[in-house]
Image (cartoon, helix red, strand yellow):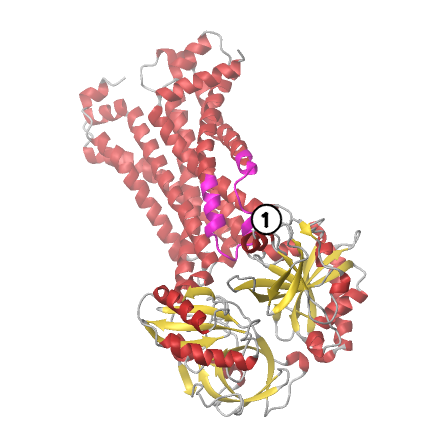
Amino acid sequence: MHPLVGDLRRGVRLWLKSRGLAALALVALALGIGATTAIFSVVNAVLLQPLPFHDAGRLLAIFEKNIPQQKSDLYVAGINIYEWRRRSLTVSGVAAIFDGKMVLTGGGMEGEELKSERVSANLFPLLGVQPVLGRGFLASEDVPGPASVAVLSYELWQRRFGADPSLPGKSIRLRGSDYTVVGVLPPGFSVIEPGVDVWTTLNFDINDPRVASGRSLTAIARLRRGVTFEQAVSEFDSMGASLEAAYPAIDSGYRAMVRPLAEHIVGKTRQALLVLLAAVGLLLGIACANVANLLLARGATRRKEIAVRAALGASRLRITVQLLAESVLLALAGGALGAVLAAAAVTLVARLGPANLPRLAQIHADWRLLLFAVVISVLTGLLFGMAPALQISSGNLNAALVESGRGGTVGRSGRTLRSGLVVLEIALALVVLIGATLLARSFNRLRSVNPGFDTSNLLTCRLPFSGGRNAAPPRRVAFLHDVMPRLAALPGVRSVGACNGLPLTGLDAGVMFAIADRPAPPPDQRPMALTRSVTTDYFRVMGIPLLAGREFTDADTSQSPAVAVIDQALARRFFPGASPLGGRLALDWSPPVVAQVVGVVGSVKPETVQGEDWATIYSPYDQRPTPATNIVIRTAGEPLAVAASVRGEVRRLDPEQPVGEVRTGGDLAANAVGGARFNTLLLGLFGAISFVLAAVGIYGVVSYDVGERVQELGIRMALGAQKGDVLSLILGHAVRLAALGIGLGLAGALVLTRLMTSMLFGVHPRDFGTYAAAAVGLAVVALAASYLPARRAMGLDPIKALRHE
C-alpha cells in the first residue's frame, strides 16, 4: 500500500475520533469554500467566460456621446451607421439593432407582448451565430418596406410553438401582420439586451429623414484582423469630425463611443463582482486561519505521539506529509460540503439575481464549479495545514517525551503562532465588516431617496396597442376612454390613470426641444427632454405633486391647442427665476409641435433612485397617443388583489388585447435598487460569517491559552493573586490581540474600500462613523468571546491547578 494511502486512512480514523473538532473545522471550511466557489462561478460566467460569438474579442459596441451637453451612451443616428459602413477601414462590418416590442396574436393563442429587436441582415453573420433551425436573414430581405420575416428565440419556439421542427416557413401574426418564420436561434442567445423573443429585419431606409436623423439604434462592429482597438477609436473619432461637417444639423457636437462589446455588457457590475470576490477571498482566509488554530490546538496534544514516531525512525518530512495529508483530507470534506452550498447558491443567484446582472442566464452550476471546489479545497488544505504541520513536527521531541504538561518551547512558539492567526482573523474580518457596513448604509440611503411618486398601494400593467384593432391612434384613445371607467369601478380601486413610461423603469422616449419665444440654440446645444403621454388623472394617481398651474383636463383633446406640463427639473433649468406658465416649447416631433406650458409638477426618478433628474415634458394622451401605455391604479388594499379583475375587464372589452408586466409600486422601487440590494445582502452575509468566525477564533485561542496556563495561574493564585488579577491577565491578552487585529484591519480597509467607491451612494468609502462602529463592535465581541474562558480561569482551585498535568 502506498504510504500516502496509509496516511489518508489514518487521517480518517483520527478525525472520526475527534468528531467535535472535525465538525467545527468542516463548518468553517464549508462556509469559506462554498462562498468562494459560488462567487467565483458568478464571476467566471459574467467576467471571465468569452461571449458566445466567433472571435468575440474583436466585437465592438458603438454608441454616441454629445460633448457640449455632456451626455454619453446615446443611441446612434441612422446616417452615421450608413457612413461608418462606407468609410471605415478598421472594422469589417457594422450591424444595427433597434430595441422594441411586438404583440404575438392569432392561431388561437392568447395575445402576448414579446421583447423584439429589428436588426440588419448582417448581424448574425457578423457575430458568427448560426440558427439551430432554419436560417438567418438574407440581404434581399433587409430592404426598405414592411418587414415580413422573423427569427425566433429558442425559448419562444419551445414555449409558444411546442418546439415544432416544421415551424420555419410557416407564418405567425406579429403586430397585426403576417411574418414568415425563417429560423430559430441557439438557446440563451442575446447580444446586449437579454430575453429577446423575436428578431425581424431592420429595413433600413437612409433616404427617410426620420431614419437618418433619429437616434434610436445600437451599432455592433467587428475589428479587422491586424487592427488594434486604439486604431478603431482614432478612426471613428476622425469620422465624427467629418460627419459633423457633412451633417451639422444631425451630428453637431456628437462623437462615437467605441468600446469592446464584452466590456459594454459587463458595465459597472465588474467592480461590484470583483469586490465580492475579494470579500470571499478574505472570508476564506479567515476560515483557513480558524482551522489552522484548531489544528494547532489539536497538534499540541499529539506532541508525544509525534515524538514516539520520530524516535522509531520517522523523518520530519514523513511526519509533515502525514499531517498535511490529514489537513487536505479535512479540506476535501469541507470542500464537498462547500460545493453543495455553492451549487445551491449559484442556482439562487441565477433565479433571484438582479435583472441588471449581465449574462444572468449563463450562470449555472456545472463541472467547472466542482473542479474549482476541488482545487480550492486542496490549496486551502495545504494553506491551513502547513503551519501546524511544521510546528508540530519541529521542536524538542525528546522534551515532548518527558514533559508533563508544563509546556516548553513548542508550547510557547505554538501559542505565538495561534495568537498571530487570531490577529489575522480579526484584521480580515474587520475589512469585510467595514465593507458590508458601508454597503448597508449606502443601501439605506438609496431606500430613503424620494423617487418623486407614491409607491404604496399602486398597481401597474402594460397595454401594447401595436397590432390588433387598437393599433390606430384614434382607437388607442377610444380604448382607454372605454376601459378606464370600468377599471375605476372595480372593488378596491380608488383611481386610475395611464402613462407611456413609468418612473424607475428607464429613460424611454425623448425629444429635442427649444423655448419657442427665445433665439434658437445651435443644433449641438439643443436640449433633450424625456416625453410622457399621460391621462388626466395620472399625476393624482401617482402622487406626483402639482407645483404650479393646472393638470390636464378632458378639454385637452386632439382638436384643442397643444399643451404641456413640465417637471420641476425642466422649469428650474430653462425658466430660472420666472414662471414657466404660458411659455411655449418647440418640440422636434414629426411633424414639429409647439405646446404651451400649463402646469409644473414635481420631478420623478426615471431610471434609478441614485440617478439624475431628467427634464421631462408631459403631453395629454389624447394629443399624443403612444403605441403602448401603462395603466396605473391606486388601490385601497393589496394591489395584486385586483390584478385578475383588471385583466378580466380589459379582455371583456377586447379579448385580443394583451395585458403584460403586472407590477406593484413596490416592485418598481425594489427593481430600481436590485443591484445594490444584491451586493449588500451578499457582502452583509460574508461580514456576518467573518464576524462569527473571528469570535470563535479568539474564544478558541484564549480558552486554549487558559488550559495551557493552568499551573501558572494556580501558582499566581497560591501566591495571593485575586480573581480580578486573573481576569485582567486573561482579558489583557485578548485585548492586545484584538487591538493589533483591529489596527491592521483598519489599515487594510483604508486601502481596499477605495475599490467600492462606485458601489456607494451618499457614503464616503472612508466614513469615520462606519470604521468606528465596525471596530468597536468587533472589539466588544472579542472581549465577550474572551470573558467565558476568563471566568473559568477565575474559578480555578489553586491546589488542583498545581497538580494539573
Residue 670 colored in magenta in the image:
no
Residue 664 appears in the picture as rendered: yes
Front residue of this view, candidates 273 and 755: 273
Residue drawn at x 55%, y 50% as measured from the top left = 361
Q: Residues within 10 Å of mark 1 (few under 14, many from 20)?
A: many
Among the 4 quarters of the image, the one containing residue 521: bottom right
Q: Disc 1 residue type?
A: Leu
Quadrant of the frame with the C terminus: top left
Residue drawn at x 39%, y 19% as measured from the top left = 14
Front residue of this view, candidates 572 and 251: 251
Residue 418 appears in the picture as rendered: no
Tell me where residue 432 appears, x and y as whole percent: 43, 47
In the image, is residue 358 above or below residue 365?
Answer: below
In the image, is residue 695 above or below residue 53?
Answer: above
Front residue of this view, candidates 31 and 483: 483
Among the 4 quarters of the image, the one containing residue 124: bottom right
Residue 358 colored in magenta in the image:
yes
- Span highlighted in magenta in the image: 342-371
Circle 1 residue: 47
